[in-house]
Image (spheres, rainbow, N blue to C red):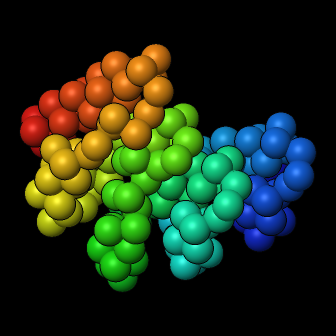
């Protein structure tokens, strides 16, 4: 079955989160193999400003999965916006962002220092006491993975 990228991309915004999540998974899978989602980078970047944390998370995820195809330096242009989500208002979105950073650093080595700096400066006291250790652990893990690259 050939995936219709345009239709699948539109499903990322579906009101039904299960439908949107399935679309995300399909686009992640295809992004590992080909650059066919890459033409949507500008739209993915716009998703980072969404009021909906699920949409922000999907944008963060697919941007990271397309870092290896980023010949036009689209991620470099929006890295500051991307890194703001290390301390996203929703801790789950923040954690997802942090876990994706080693993937970006791997394919965009020129951004490695920016990423490490943002991780170092991240103020996790914005989260409830119950979430802080989890976010802290994610930051440590991402930091260590990026240092090894």
Residue 85 position, x and y percent, is: 43, 53
> Can the viewer see residue 31?
no
Among the 4 quarters of the image, the one containing residue 67: bottom left
Measured from the top left, where is residue 92 in percent x and y? Answer: 54, 35
Where does residue 59 sit, x and y in percent of width and height?
57, 58
- Of 2 and 128, which appears nearest the observer? 128
Instruction: Answer with left or right where residue 48 lies relative to residue 86.
Output: right
- The vertical placement of 71 against 121, above or below, is below
Residue 40 position (above or below residue 110): below
Q: In the image, what residue occupies the spot 32% across and 53% down? A: 104
Q: Percent x, y for residue 32? A: 49, 49
Residue farthest toward the right in the current orientation of the protein: 16
Q: In front: 128, or 92?
A: 128
Q: Identify the image quadrant of residue 39.
A: bottom right
User: Furthest residue to the bottom?
Assistant: 72
Q: How many marks?
A: 0
Say which quadrant the C terminus sits in: top left
Q: Quadrant of residue 48?
A: bottom right
Q: What residue sits 50% from the left and 36% below the top?
A: 91
Residue at 30% x, 22% y: name it: 137
Drawn side of residue 39 relative to residue 125, left or right: right
Residue 11 seen in render: yes
């Amino acid at each position: 079955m050939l995936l219709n990228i345009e239709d699948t991309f539109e499903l990322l915004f579906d009101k039904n989160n299960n439908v949107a999540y399935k679309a995300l998974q399909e686009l992640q899978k295809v992004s590992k193999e080909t650059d066919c989602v890459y033409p949507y980078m500008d739209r993915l970047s716009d998703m980072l400003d969404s009021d909906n944390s699920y949409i922000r998370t999907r944008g963060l995820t697919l941007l990271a999965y397309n870092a290896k195809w980023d010949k036009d330096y689209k991620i470099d242009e929006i890295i500051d916006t991307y890194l703001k989500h290390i301390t996203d208002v929703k801790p789950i979105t923040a954690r997802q962002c942090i876990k994706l950073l080693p993937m970006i650093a791997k394919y965009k080595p020129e951004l490695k220092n920016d990423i490490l700096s943002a991780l170092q400066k991240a103020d996790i006291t914005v989260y409830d006491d119950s979430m802080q250790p989890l976010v802290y652990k994610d930051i440590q893990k991402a930091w260590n993975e990026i240092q090894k690259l």
